[in-house]
Image (spheres, coloured by chain):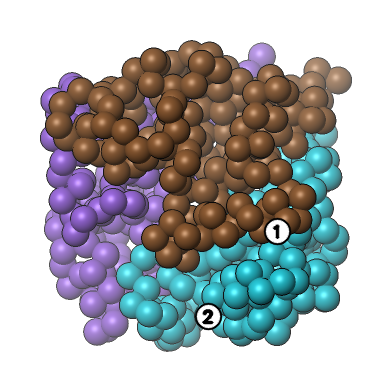
Chain colours: A cyan, B purple, C brown
Amino acid sequence: MNNLKENKKLSIICFSGSFDKLVAAFTLATGAAAVNYDVHIFFTFWGLNAIKNPKGRRFIGKGAMAKTFNYLMGGINNVPLSRLNFFGISPKLMSSMMKKRNVATLKELIEAAIALDVNLYSCEMSMNILGIEMKDFIPEIKEVLAVPKFLEYSAGGERIFI
Amino acid sequence: MNNLKENKKLSIICFSGSFDKLVAAFTLATGAAAVNYDVHIFFTFWGLNAIKNPKGRRFIGKGAMAKTFNYLMGGINNVPLSRLNFFGISPKLMSSMMKKRNVATLKELIEAAIALDVNLYSCEMSMNILGIEMKDFIPEIKEVLAVPKFLEYSAGGERIFI
Amino acid sequence: MNNLKENKKLSIICFSGSFDKLVAAFTLATGAAAVNYDVHIFFTFWGLNAIKNPKGRRFIGKGAMAKTFNYLMGGINNVPLSRLNFFGISPKLMSSMMKKRNVATLKELIEAAIALDVNLYSCEMSMNILGIEMKDFIPEIKEVLAVPKFLEYSAGGERIFI
């Protein structure tokens, strides 16, 4: 019984910041939360794009290099497709295909994850490298974690790297 | 004892449609099936390229956008390498290197997976977005799954995202 | 109790050879080892770049195709960023940002993993395809593994594909 309950925990290390992989991560997260899984998403590196606020390109971070890199990374509004991106046209096409088929868009998936109490964390080391802080994220981020804390929170469940 | 048996289940979310990652997914799947693991592969997004039938580029799906996108994605016969692709030359070179070394090619790995009773599923949402149906896949696909069903089938085992 | 101990095993299939994903893999590995996890890294395909010795581009392997491919893949000194690589400038910028912020560099992370007794393995099949041998790796590689052996060593713990 105890074992069964433990198996109902899913933790996603969201490393990727591409449109398609973020759709995959949030579809998995919301689908699991909907069937009562305890879901944790740990955003790191490119994945931070999903939780930056505001959501477009901005020069944030400390130092010129960090600022430039953050600008180029962008935010959730301009995440690329991991293949066949065509300079950003494809994510827009994909979004319109999703709307047409009544599939939740990436924006709606993120909102659903928040509504379903999916736990969102950001990675301390990535934030250090990119010189960004909690104030640069959406307010729903619960905590800044390093690896040991992430391992503790995700223990006894499944860990997936996307 | 029960626990040991449970650990012999491996589920792969096959998101990638690149030659090298498909080789990795099917090598892991067949290797695990060969030592009596219960193996499940859930094909989603680019991974659907591995199971489309026929296997080349085709205009399938509903609507012009879906048709174009499916054509560009292609099928198992023209999956790219995730790096150093050189317009599709590298997967061909890689296949010839695999043959030369007597390593199973991707085509052989897929046949082996089917022979070893690896369970193959496709993702409902990706099919909706791309407007494709069961008839567009190889006949070995057992079922179309959404996330909750996938979580149910893979419960008590290991889940890997490729 | 037994269960708790079993959960303290983490196995990483290190498929990627990009700078950012290698940083992620080794950060996770060293972080877990630091809190007493039993950690295993299985290097396959592009991931072999992390363990080649010497560490730059070299014509190794049997046959002209393997030699060319290994040269293009390179070693740990010239791994690219998975996005925004800018012909190799970004990994250098990233390394300098890491130093500036006192974050361990990739080289330091690999040294730390070795010091923390992280178990390093290489993939038999990838070595066959690329025509490379144990002598082409750093001496810390413990063993060449195929899938069944990897499944055996990683059993009872968590498996992550990066």
Residue nearest the viewer, comparing A71 with B73: A71
What subunit carries mark 2?
A: A
Q: Residue A42: image x %, image y %? A: 71, 56
Q: Can residue B111 be seen?
A: no
Residue type at mark 1: give it. Ile
Q: Residue A153: image x %, image y %? A: 82, 45
Residue C60 placement, left or right of A10: left
Residue to which mark 2 is pinned: A78
Residue A94 placement, left or right of C24: left
Q: Residue B117: image x %, image y %? A: 34, 31
Tell me how many marks there are. 2
Real-space CA distance between mark 1 and mark 2, rounded to the nearest whole angstrom = 21 Å
Residue to which mark 1 is pinned: A129
Q: Residue A68: image x %, image y %? A: 60, 75
Residue nearest the viewer, comparing C42 with C4: C42
Residue at 65% x, 83% y is A58
